[in-house]
Amino acid sequence: MAEPPDGYPFLPFDKAMEQANVQTKPMFVYFGRYGCGYCDKTNKEAFSDPGVKEQYSKNYVLAYVDSESGKRLRLPSGERITERELGTRYNAFVTPVFSFVAPDGTVITRMVGVQRIEDLMDAHNTVQQALKKAGAS
């Protein structure tokens, strides 16, 4: 099984979606896989940053999806899908893919490939601005 970055409260997608709905918080979904060198590089070089950890842990419900797993998930709707099917829904055909998802399930933005600290912080700032703007309208 692929592993999410150490020290983060990542949940399986179905559990994260339930929590996001209860807390009305956006989700940050990390699609990774075992043996993904780009995932490992991003985990070591970007997710190791204390500022990234603080902002992501505080502002998002974190979900980790093993894109090669055949594990069945049950969505809040009751629908049962595999993690692979979920990756297809979120256009995660390579790894890593990172999607920011609004509480209503809409993808706000996504990033593909190795991410640096700056990339994760810029994406966080962009998402937070978009959410504030959406809340103001």
Image: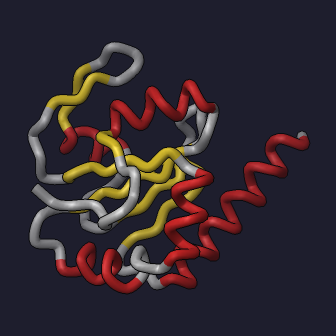
Image quarter of residue 95: bottom left
In the rendered view, how is the structure colored?
secondary structure
Q: Residue at point 39% right, 58% down? A: 8
Q: Position of residue 75 (x, y in %)?
A: 35, 24
Tell me which residue sits at (50%, 67%) in the image: 53
> From what the image shows, is residue 126 above or below residue 74?
below
Which residue sits at x=62%, y=65%? 124
- Answer above or below: position of 115 versus 9: below
The quadrant holding residue 32 is bottom left
Q: Nearer the viewer, residue 23 or 65?
A: 23
Residue 73 location (% of width, % of height): 23, 29
Image coords of residue 85 (percent x, y): 23, 39
Q: Is residue 120 above or below residue 25?
A: below
Quarter of the image that includes the C terminus:
top right
- Is 91 left or right of 27, judged from the image as shown? left
The spot of residue 122 in percent (x, y) is 63, 75
**Image quarter of residue 93:** bottom left
Image-based side of 43 in relation to 40, left or right = right
Total marks drawn? 0
Left or right of residue 102, residue 84 in this image: left
Q: Residue furthest right?
A: 136
The residue shown at (16%, 30%) is 72
Residue sitting at the far top:
78
Tell me the quadrant of the picture where the N terminus can be found: bottom left
